[in-house]
Image: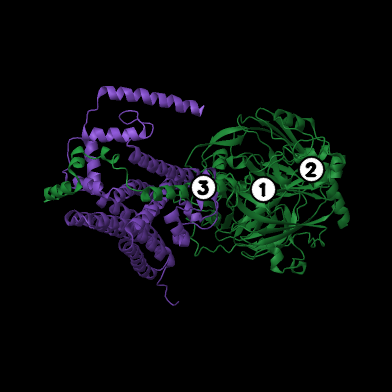
Amino acid sequence: MAVDVFSVPIFLVVFREALETVIIISVLLAFLKQTLDGPNRDPQVYRKLVWQVWLGTGLGFFICFAVGGAVIGVFYTSGANKWEGTELNYEGAFSLIAAIIITIVGAALLRIGKMQEKWRVKLAVAMEEPIRIGSTKGSIKRFFEKYAMFILPFITVLREGIEAIVFVAGVTFSAPASAVPLPVIMGLLVGAVVGYILYKGGSSTRLQIFLVFSTCLLYLVAAGLFSRAVWYFEAQKWNNAVGGDAAEVGDGPGSYDIDKSVWHVNCCSPTLNGGSGWGFFNAILGWTNSATYGSVLAYNLYWIFVIVMFIVMRYREVKGHYPLMRAKAPLTQTEATKTHDSENEAPVPSGSQSREEIAESKAVNTHTSKAHV
Amino acid sequence: MASSLVCLLGSLAIASASTVKYDFEIGWVTANPDGLADRPTIGINGQWPIPKIEANVGDQLIVNVLNSLGNQSTSLHFHGLYMNGSTHMDGPAQVTQCAIQPGSRFTYNFTISQPGTYWYHSHTHGQYPDGLRGPLIIHDPESPFKDRYDEEMVLTVSDWYHDQMPGLLSFFISKVNPTGAEPVPNSALLNETQDLRVPVEPGKTYLFRMINIGAFAGQYIWFESHNMTIIEVDGVYTQPAEAERIYLSAAQRCSFLLTTRNDTSENFAINANMDITLFDQLPGDLNWNVTGWLVYDSAKPLPIPTELESDVYDEFDDMTLVPWDNQALLGEPDQSISLDVIMDNLNDGANYAFFNNITYVAPKVPTLFTVLTSGDLVSNSAIYGEYTHPFVLEKDQIVEIIVNNIDPGKHPFHLHGHNFQAVWRSEEEAGTFQDSGVTSDNFTQVPMRRDTVVLFPNGNVVLRFKADNPGVWLFHCHIEWHVQSGLMATFVEAPLELQQTLAVPKDHYDACDAGKVPTQGNAAGNTVNLFDLSGQNVPPGPLPEGFTTRGKVAMAFSVLTGLIGVAVVAWYGFAGPAPAAAAPAAAPPQSVGTGGGISHGTLVGAGK
């Protein structure tokens, strides 16, 4: 080992960030392929959306390289890590945004997988509809719907990239500069290749399985991100309190706020030295060697939210209305279906029928409540 | 002839022994010794710097204290005095007395049996850096050097903070200072001021009594173009030793002869540089040097100090000093105490200092009162409580203290009630004494004695003394921050004799009553079963190691919700298409009516 040309931590970080990015991109591409490039081909919309994905990715990369260049330039000219002061707040914000986007898009992906046809239409409608200036709320929503395929990879690449840059830039001060380029390129390549294999595997075998599997993975990542967002904000507060970078004391005492700690092991840090294997653990399962009340609660609440969200969604799919919210009229399931059918076919049901049904349902209700008692 | 002269002098000394009395009203004044910031400072009788205490060997010293601070209790320690027969006058609060409450009076009354350069300071709540620190000089009509000098002067070096100790301490011992970084002083002072002018006459020899009365910083001290001849350290006369530059840690003293030049054409700088290796960080605006001048001619300019050629101070090694009385190395110890200096964090997140695994916490009953009220259990160290880190020494034992520094900082260790032979001191980074292979054969045969010795980073030191002074004596690092973070042990020396002979005056008990401090029982204040230490003062618990119960529960919950969550996502993903009837609620009615295929085509058409 005459010259140090390969910094393992840098490789791991770049690989991890690249993989995370590619997983998200490949899920999006797989989805697009499945929904728009299948039997009901819609090459135009498909190409447009694929282009959006790649545009988001590309722009994300471009901004990353610009920011990275600027950051490294600042490092070398001022000799101080300007990011470090508030780095964790940025990380936290990016994590939070990513978690929210994955959550929304993930659900959409699954719904789309199931109700391809309708969603394809809806998506296509959204795509083609011009943005309206009138109502802000509506236009933002529409804007997001219209450019979701752009925003998600854009934010992902930006977040992962900036994370990697800050780390790589930091390491270049402790490691010789010669040890940087190779692992960065290797990390990107290996990450991309692994991602591509996932994608290929996904599109050639049963896409449904890949879609569900990778969406599960995405939600795991998102849960970790959400938890980490809280963790980052807390870590930034702690850094400010300690008056320096708490990470400088390694993973031992003082690297965390004891009063907020749920567990802390003096090892296995996902951030120190690229995190080694713990970094992957962190990226995919949200592992941290120093959990706080906030991060644990965030993780669990996130999952509870996701669980409830999917159950509610399924409930609505099956029953046609949200739980606890009587749809149009309080009905039993079969009657609801019937009514819905009739509603669609003949929008105005007769008043007397409706009243009858209300009375009927009240009787059912009293009955059930009695049974509960 | 010679012996009769000694007898004569001896009787003269006894005849001249007198009572020296000081009335001290301790209160707040405003001071600004470095010209950078006014701050409330603890003065005496409305003055700061506080007065110098002076007496002769054999004198009885009475200090009447009135605490007028209003917001803080206090106590006075007379650093270096053996307090033989008067351990209750030694000063540390909760050890040999109760702190003097605001508005209360207290009298220190003892006889001085030793000559030399000492100092007095508060020994309560890390208080002395706020100003309560001053020289205490015991003149010796029989000094072996009394004919070697014309005049004597006292010089102090110290460090100065612009903030008060209570605030600094609450930062220092807190979770936001997990590395235990000691607050860095704002200035260095010479005689509690800066730009000190010391008028001297040519061709004379002066005795300088130099004292570091600082809280934290050791100081390198030298006089440009003048050498020093060391003749005393910490009250122990030494064989004269030439030095160009000396190092004084907090609490160390050194007396030296300095002969002035014969011409008055120039004045010369006196340099005192704080030892910045002690500081965790160097604030950009910190001037860690203080300058004074030997002024031969006040009309001549005061020169700017010469820059050192390198950062190497090359100070005089005090281990090479030989005591004037040539006292030989004490024999093999009857009791050997090994203390490892460790810094670690406890579960409040703050950083504490430990001897072995114990960080000092003051007992509920001052240790001396436990001695006086524990009957025949007095020699059982358990009653003094684990966290006072007590060692019971039997009368006239030879005691050896081995201190291993497991910390990368310098620590000046001070023993109350004694001086000790510093029989061995390793270089930096030498590791523990036990691992070093050094034996008593390597010890200095006529070792230097003093009461405060510097232990080097990751090094070790071996000290010996004879337990011939019944009392309760602290052994501690004299960096005031470390006193507060617990780097302290208690030696209970000849407790049985102490219990039988010591009479504590009423005002000591009054002080305890005023502070509602119990004066009976063990460290926990239990009087029935002295081995029952329930309720004693304890430090925070240890930091949890890895996964505690709550960590496991949290992890289990997280894994469970994660698994359920993934299962729900998968369930939803694999669940069959929704019943056709339910779905249209979200979709526009016309698309349902017309059917997917057609609508699709229309939209693509619109897209073009």
Task: Using residue B334 as the reference point, say whether residue A113 is left or right of it.
Answer: left
Is residue B18 visible in the rendered image? The answer is no
The span from disc 3 to disc 2 (Cα, nearest Å) is 43 Å
Circle 1 sits on which residue? Answer: B359
Q: State the residue at coordinates (29%, 49%).
A: A112
Of the numbered discs in the image, which one, if any, rests on residue B187? 3
Marks 1 & 2 on one chain: yes
Query: Does residue A371 appear left or right of residue A186 in this picture?
Result: right
The chain carrying label 3 is B
For disc 3, the neighbor class at 10 Å (few under 14, some 14 to 19, many from 20) is many
Kindly identify the amino acid type of the residue bearing the numbered disc 1: Thr
The vertical placement of B275 against A3, above or below, is above
Which image quadrant for residue A66? bottom left
Tell me which label, 1 or 2, sits earlier in the chain: 1
Q: Secondary structure at mark 1?
A: loop
Circle 2: is it few (<14), some (14-19), or many (20+) Cα within 10 Å?
A: many
Q: Which residue is mark 2?
A: B383
Residue A121 rendering spot, x and y as whole percentages: 21, 47
Which residue type does callout 2 highlight?
Answer: Ile
Front: mark 3 or 2: 2
In the rendered image of the structure, the colour used to display chain A is purple
